[in-house]
């Protein structure tokens, strides 16, 4: 679905569906009246009959004399309308439109002024929510049951001052869609080789994007023992995917994004329970998120240099798999005692983080569906941010608030570090109970000393259930952070 801004008068708009907002107990609606006396009379009668009052979540569909659908969304009281409600209203409206005969939709919610939501933020929420609602996964379906799904374009009414904002949000939406595509594809398709091919297609699309892919032989020669240990039980060999975007002068240090790309996680020898193991195809959503953010940046041609690194590995149990009790040597030279082969994400990330620092980045953000403990701590509402760099967590959190893709900071105090000490190596790969999310962050911090760095655990936000699957979070937050850094 193509998304663009428009200043077209609603009466002149020939879209199949027009979306209008209406606050609770508001007697007149300027946009409805602009569409003609007949429609205004229909609407007035519905209000008088109390068929519609404008309560938050209500919707009413009317038809113009030309056969256009007009969807009127109840916004509730203006002083109580928040970001979540605005997002959900647009998500549901576009999802409903996708089940109709409509091809073109025009959204006029920005004709209103919201008491608690700035206009630029509202524009982003409308675009992101609409794209999210329109999305359908159909990659592995031969029978397309949802044959009414045919939305081709969305125009968002906005003042000219907001047109760049809508354009940015549209690029974000493309990145979110790319991340959802990667996350939702099954593990027999979306393996390390597939991720490398996906990155290759991105590199071919943009002139200022380059790609390097390290294979397992190259990584072995380099000494990436932690990453290779995780992948040694799988027939699908690991790849290190390195995307480089050049949007600024070459001397400007890049921002680096590192994403956990476990394309399927059985747990290895420390085998996971069979129930819901199918969801472990989502264990590469960190990789999907950083690739999605890369797509968004390349699409909007942001004036920064961006480095995106994805260690793509499958964690399987067989006779060659790494074992609890093994001691492996990471790319940094530090040794790791493996106590649990299901704590594999940090094993591949530590080598990728060491490698990322060779490019002398200004800052590194790593993203991973790393710990179930994060879901216990924050549920599915917020990603967890951990850092030893003053102010960095707040920059990430603020970016998330701008696009309603929220995060929350957890501490990385030195007192937690002792939980990963061991007598048999420089560290062990789990900290045990309690504070599992934090000790995972402590592990990664040992490979980023002296580097401006933050770890973001997205275990609770990257996917939510079998019906929706991958959410594409936190692509919007990441992209907004990069926009903010571009200044």
Image: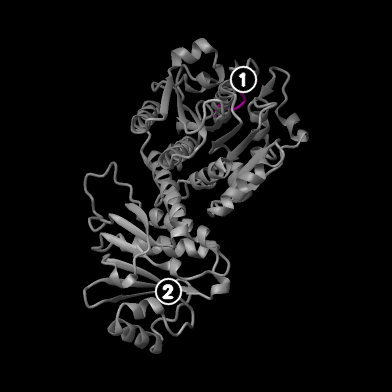
Residue 250, horizontal then vertical, whole percent: 52, 26
Residue 371, horizontal then vertical, whole percent: 58, 39
Provide the residue span drawn in magenta: 336-342
Q: Residue, x 35% and y 88% (percent of image)?
A: 45
Q: Which residue is mark 2?
A: 58
- Label 2, label 1: how many angstroms apart (C-alpha)? 58 Å
Looking at the rendered image, the disc whose residue lies closer to the viewer, 2 or 1, is 2
Q: Secondary structure at mark 2?
A: loop
Q: With 154 as the anchor, is 369 left or right in this view?
A: right
Residue 112, horizontal then vertical, whole percent: 47, 71
Residue 29, horizontal then vertical, whole percent: 41, 80
Q: With 70 as the anchor, is 312 left or right in this view?
A: right
Q: Is residue 217 visible?
A: yes
Q: Residue, x 53% and y 69% (percent of image)?
A: 114
**How is the protein colored in the picture?**
one colour
Name the chief secondary structure element in magenta: loop
């Amino acid at each position: 679905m193509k998304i663009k801004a428009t200043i077209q008068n609603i009466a002149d708009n020939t879209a199949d569906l027009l979306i209008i907002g209406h606050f609770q107990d508001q007697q007149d609606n300027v946009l409805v009246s602009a569409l003609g006396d007949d429609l205004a009379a229909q609407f007035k009668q519905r209000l008088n009959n109390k068929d519609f009052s404008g309560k938050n979540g209500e919707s009413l569909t009317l038809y113009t004399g030309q056969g256009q659908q007009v969807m009127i969304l109840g916004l509730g009281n203006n002083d109580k309308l928040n970001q979540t409600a605005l997002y959900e209203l647009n998500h549901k409206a576009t999802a409903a439109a996708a089940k109709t005969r409509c091809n073109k939709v025009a959204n006029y919610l920005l004709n209103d002024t919201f008491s608690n939501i700035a206009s630029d933020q509202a524009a982003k929420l409308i675009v992101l929510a609409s794209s999210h609602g329109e999305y359908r996964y159909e990659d592995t379906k031969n029978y397309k049951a949802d044959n009414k799904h045919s939305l081709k374009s969305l125009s968002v009414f906005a003042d000219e001052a907001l047109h760049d904002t809508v354009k940015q949000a549209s690029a974000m939406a493309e990145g979110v869609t790319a991340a959802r595509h990667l996350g939702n594809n099954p593990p027999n398709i979306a393996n390390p080789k597939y991720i490398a091919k996906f990155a290759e297609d991105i590199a071919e699309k943009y002139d200022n994007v380059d790609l390097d892919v390290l294979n397992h032989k190259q990584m072995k020669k380099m000494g990436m023992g932690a990453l290779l240990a995780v992948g040694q039980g799988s027939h699908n060999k690991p790849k290190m995917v390195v995307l480089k975007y050049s949007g600024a002068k070459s001397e400007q240090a890049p921002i680096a994004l590192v994403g956990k790309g476990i394309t399927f996680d059985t747990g290895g020898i420390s085998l996971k329970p069979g129930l819901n193991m199918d969801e472990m195809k989502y264990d590469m959503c960190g990789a999907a998120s950083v690739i999605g953010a890369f797509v968004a940046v390349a699409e909007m041609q942001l004036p920064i240099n961006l480095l995106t690194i994805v260690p793509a590995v499958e964690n399987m149990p067989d006779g060659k798999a790494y074992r609890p009790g093994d001691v492996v040597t990471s790319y940094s030279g530090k040794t790791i005692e493996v106590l649990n082969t299901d704590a594999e994400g940090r094993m591949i990330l530590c080598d990728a983080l060491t490698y990322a620092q060779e490019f002398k980045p200004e800052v590194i953000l790593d993203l991973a569906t790393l710990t179930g403990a994060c879901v216990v701590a924050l549920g599915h509402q917020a990603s967890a941010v951990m850092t030893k760099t003053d102010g960095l967590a707040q920059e990430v959190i603020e970016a998330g608030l701008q696009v309603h893709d929220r995060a929350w900071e957890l501490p990385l105090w030195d007192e937690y570090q002792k939980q990963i000490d061991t007598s048999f190596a420089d560290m062990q790969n789990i900290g045990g109970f309690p504070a599992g999310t934090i000790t995972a962050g402590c592990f990664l911090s040992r490979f980023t000393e002296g580097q401006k760095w933050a770890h973001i655990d997205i275990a609770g936000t990257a996917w939510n259930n079998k019906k929706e699957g991958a959410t594409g979070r936190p692509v919007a937050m990441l992209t907004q952070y990069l926009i903010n850094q571009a200044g």
